[in-house]
Amino acid sequence: MKKFLVAAAGIAALGWAVPASAADMAVKAPPPAPVVAIYNWSGFYIGANGGWGQSHNCVDLITDVFGTVSGCRDRSGGVVGGQLGYRWQTNQFVFGLEAQGDWADLSNTRVSVFDPTLSTTVKTDAIGLFTGQLGWAWNAALLYVKGGAAVTRNRLDVFDNTTGVGLFSASNTRWGGTVGVGFEYGFAPNWSVGVEYDHLWMGHANNDFVVVRPLATLLGDRVSQDVDMVTVRFNYRFGGYTAPVAARY
């Protein structure tokens, strides 16, 4: 009987030890979750851009002798400039305001269709954009659309092919609208690089002028203009940061 009680006590002690050991294993703390850096697009930024532009112009030239002569031309060249703006991010939505100014070299010269002794040179040498942005961010990647106002500075020159003498010149600043789309990637906490396409429609401009050769000839033109731009952009954002967030399983 005594041996039986000792054996029973040993079995009971062994039974208590096994659950206690299992309980100790169950409450062991899991390893800490890794920390993931989330890119934040909020803040003021300034940057530079450069690329290619093309201006499409259609001209209705009105004279007192030949009536109306119409024609369209394209002129393309380089653009380079800078931009500044502000963005703020809410969840994955990114809103922004931006001003951009570019020097341009979009020029074209051709002989007049109604008087081969005359040539015209049309040049766009400056472009400005004032736009709002709406974007969608995937961490350090941002896809956005933009739209707003556009301004171009243009110059028209008419000269005599036989003498090389300039007969008339006019400059004007034209306002219109713009829409665009872009993609930007943040490769450092404060730096990003991207590519952007913009289309500008600048409406119509009218000029009246007189050419004396040797008789006075009254001329007038009505010029419409569209511009397409593709640029590569680099931006530096002030106060930029990445927010550390613990990953979830």
Image (spheres, grey):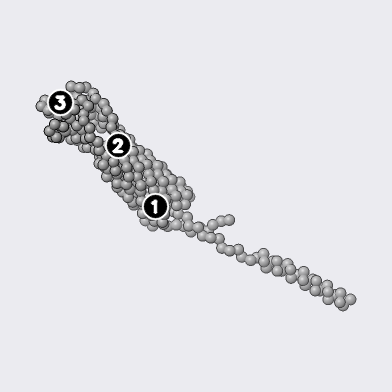
Instruction: Determine which of the numbered discs, if any, sits on residue 217 in the image.
Output: 3
State the quadrant of the C terminus.
bottom right
Q: Which amino acid type is shown beneath numbered disc 2?
A: Ser
Where does the image place residue 197, in percent across and percent down from the top left?
Answer: 37, 41
Residue 194 image position (x, y, % from top left): 39, 48
Is residue 110 rendered to the left or right of residue 136? Answer: left
| Residue at 39% across, 52% down | 192
Residues packed near mark 1 inside 10 Å, few (<14), some (14 to 19) or many (20 plus): many
Question: Which of marks 3 and 2 precedes in the sequence?
Answer: 2
Tell me what residue is drawn at x 44 percent, y 49 percent. Answer: 141
Q: Which residue is mark 1?
A: 192
Q: Residue 167 or 111: which is nearer the viewer?
A: 111
Q: Residue at x 27, y 39 (%)?
A: 106
User: SS class of the residue under badge 3?
Assistant: strand
Which image quarter: residue 32? Answer: bottom right
Q: Nearer the viewer, mark 2 or mark 3?
A: 2
Determine which residue is flagged by label 2. Answer: 55
Dot 2 alpha-carbon crowd within 10 angstroms: few under 14, some 14 to 19, many 20 or more:
many
Q: CA distance from mark 1 to mark 2?
A: 28 Å
Kindly identify the amino acid type of the residue bearing the numbered disc 1.
Answer: Ser
Residue 117 x %, y % = 16, 29
User: Height in image: 201 above or below 34?
Assistant: above
| Disc 1 element | strand
Residue 148 visible within the image: no
